[in-house]
Amino acid sequence: MKPDLLQPSLREGETYVTRSYNIDYFMCVGFLGGIFPVLVLATQNARWLGFDRKKTYILLAAGLIFMIVGTIACGAFQIAKAQGTVSRVVGITVALLYKTMLQKKYRVHMYVHGHTKRILYPAIGWIVLGKLLESFLYTLGGGEQ
């Protein structure tokens, strides 16, 4: 028998407390608010769960690029109705990617802590802010509202 197996695995001074939103609601936030609220809330959730920062930043950068290119392109082609649809489709897609990536950490969190934080009020705030940002980017791209 190895003697290091009987040594404590937790180090002093490190905290192992995690927090999380219910990751199943990210798709609802993506449908109602588009890409921006999903990026903010899912990235915050990834940080709370201790997910790999490099992967989180790559997904965040890809989502921001999709958001900016999609809204400016809709503004440049003067397609006002497509702006919301593009944002929702990309928001739901990014929400599914985040859900897939965070699933393992979320399951561990639920097993250890067994509860989630309410996402309703932060989601409403970020949805309003996201819609304002999308309309600003749309007008920046040349569209009129």
Image (cartoon, rainbow, N blue to C red):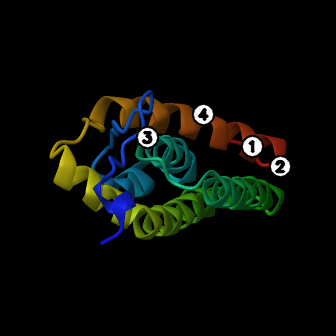
Residue 120 placement (x, y as % from top left):
28, 36
Secondary structure at badge 3 equals: helix
Closest to the observer, 103 or 132: 103
Position of 111 with respect to 107 (left or right) is left
Q: Earlier in the sequence, mark 4 or mark 2?
A: 4
| Marks 1/3: CA–CA distance | 29 Å
Closest to the observer, 46 or 87: 46
Q: Disc 1 residue type?
A: Leu
Q: Earlier in the sequence, mark 4 or mark 3?
A: 3
| Marks 3/2: CA–CA distance | 35 Å
Q: Are the residues at dot 1 and dot 2 in contact (C-beta closer than 8 Å)?
A: yes
Q: Which residue is mark 4?
A: 132
Q: Does residue 111 sit above or below 122 in this rendering?
A: below
Q: Which residue is mark 2?
A: 141
Q: Which residue is mark 1?
A: 137
The answer to whether residue 90 is seen in the rendering is yes
